Amino acid sequence: MKRLLLSLSIVFIVLTAQAQDSIDYSSNKFNQFKVVPLPAIGSNPANGWLFGIAPSATWRMGDPETTHLSNLVGNLLYTTKKQWIFSSRSTVFLNEDDWILVGDWRYFITSQPTFGLGSSSPNDPAKNPNQQGVYWGEQQMDYSWIRFYETVLKRVGDSKFYLGVGYHLDVFSKIENFIETETLDDLNFSHDFYNQQLGFNTDKYTVSGLTFNAIMENRDLAVSPYEKNFALISYKVNPSFLGSDQSSSTLLLDYRQYISVSEKRKRHLVALWGFGNFLVSGNLPYLGLPSIGYDMFGRTGRGYAQGRFRGESMAYSEAEYRFPLQKNKETFGGTLFVNASSFNSRTTNERLFTKLNPGYGLGLRVMINKENRTTITADYGFGQKGNSGFYLNINETF
């Protein structure tokens, strides 16, 4: 079955590459709205194979000389793990890049394994040596998740810097834990133990807050950059009066650099990514903690399943070498990547950088629209302890 699905996905990539025309809904040269109405075939370790619709839209809100291309990626998907995934993620640049609107809306009926907190958790269920009476290793979770993130940023003069505020809401509900293999003892699930220790409910909770953001947007094209850089600092306050179960605050740092290897072929480059998410004050419920694969587009940690590592704070870095596979065309490309992550846990007394979890892999790129660089990405990543995964997505990883 896996070989059949993989074969179908390869055929899908090739056929899509041959049909590169997108739908143009406007003749206005500034505001051309183009949609690639892709049938979706995706894959990752947390969801298995995903099938549905993943429309990708690009448009411009002003003069191409002074206004970045806006983009929106949607998903209406069903997975082989019986999950439903509905999402819309967008970055909109208004005329002359004076304002940026960033949206991340989701509704998931989903499931996911969790392995306990910190960077040292094993794959298989076991007794946690740092928490008596608690499971360590793989534990399955079923839950529903509503997310509404919307951020508005204003450009500072004629610079590449933006300042803005946002509202971020996460609601986790219908949470159930279970072990698929034979249990070792009557142990507590990591999720339930953590939440009970800190006074959170175990079946439903909310994180609701305001973000204060500073961005440097210097990339030539956000969905598939060839040059320059991007930086984000986001301080989030989650007060109880806005609906959070407990008050807390977090700090998120994100930096990306794109270094050209060839002046003649801009697609030939090295991309670098540094990402950190830190609990500053208060407490977060278990699923609200920083975790691998929980960035906006779920791209951190190739080589591991989403949620494989979790903690009060995380640090992540990645380097990727991107290159064309054709001498005079841009349709096909490839990539080699390495990454590493580290998580701390106050409940297990594990400090950040005590242990690193590396990943590495390679991938294929198919550019289905050269003007806006809409790209289908297929990667295979390897992690430690037998972890690995196949990842099929739209647009570059970062």
Image: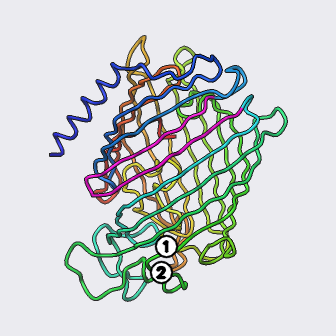
Task: Report the front residue among 282 and 77.
Answer: 77
Q: Is residue 136 left or right of residue 24?
A: left
Question: What residue type is disc 1 on?
Answer: Tyr
What label does residue 286 carry, if any? 1
Residue 26: percent from left, percent from top: 56, 21
**Is residue 203 shown in magenta?**
no
Residue 188: percent from left, percent from top: 36, 85
Q: Which residue is mark 2?
A: 194
Residue 54 sits above or below residue 79 on the image? above
Q: Residue 155's image quarter? A: top right
Task: Give me the residue at 23% from left, 81% from top.
Answer: 183
Spot the residue most to the top.
Answer: 328
| Marks 2/1: CA–CA distance | 7 Å
| Mark 2 or 1, nearer chain start | 2
Spot the residue most to the right.
Answer: 157
Specify the segment rendered in magenta.
69-94
Q: Residues within 10 Å of mark 1 (few under 14, many from 20)?
A: many
Question: What residue type is disc 2 on?
Answer: Tyr
